[in-house]
Amino acid sequence: MTDTHYPDHWPTATIDTYDSVMAESPELSGAAYQSLVEACELLAVAYSLDAVAKAANYVSKGSMGQDVLHPAVAEARLSRTEAARILARLIGPTSKGQALARARHGGVLR
């Protein structure tokens, strides 16, 4: 999938993420490239789950009939969290990001 053909189920935001990572790291291949694709799949799932939750007004019925937060909300969040974790491993810290971290942590980086 190193060409510009994207899976039909990828929303624009997922394609933008893919393109951004490939622009920053065009040498990605092998396992690292597959990690990028997996992160994009997780993002696509998250956007799909967002649509499910929105269609239900973000509410579902609990086991006792009470209104609860729709489970798709939590699943979308988990998908995004894992995608972010994968993407963070693929793209190293930028000098701007490092400067922000230093400022936030009193000039100390771990």
Image (tube, helix red, strand yellow):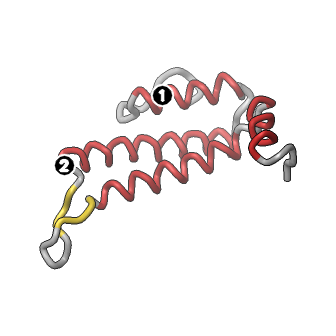
Closest to the camera, between mark 1 and mark 2, is 2
User: Looking at the picture, which amino acid does disc 2 mark?
Assistant: Asn
Look at the numbered disc 1 and give the secondary structure of its residue: helix
- Residue, disc 1: 15
The residue where tag 2 is placed is 57
Q: Residue furthest left?
A: 65
| Residue 67 percent coordinates (x, y) | 18, 65
Position in image of residue 105 (x %, y %) = 78, 48
Count how many numbered circles sit on residues in the image: 2
Packing grade of label 2 (10 A; few <14, some 14-19, many >=20) is: few
Asked if 59 appears above or below 57 in the picture, the reply is below
Given the current orientation, which residue lies at the most extreme bottom position?
64
Q: Position of residue 70 (x, y in %)?
A: 26, 59
The crowding category of the residue bearing disc 1, from other C-alpha atoms within 10 Å (few below 14, some 14 to 19, many at least 20), is some
User: Dividing the image into 4 quarters, which one contains the N terminus?
Assistant: top right
In this rendering, position of residue 23 left or right of residue 6:
right
Residue 13 in the figure: left or right of residue 87: left
Which disc number belongs to residue 23?
none
Indicate which disc, 1 or 2, sits on the residue closer to the N terminus. 1
Q: Residue at x 74, y 28 (%)?
A: 27
Q: What secondary structure is marked by label 2?
A: loop
Q: Amino acid at mark 1?
A: Ile
Farthest residue to the front: give it.
106
The structure residue drawn at horizontal position 24% and vertical position 52%, both measured from the top left corner, is 58
Left or right of residue 23, residue 74 in this image: left
Q: Please state which of residues 84 and 10 is positioned toward the viewer in this rendering.
A: 84
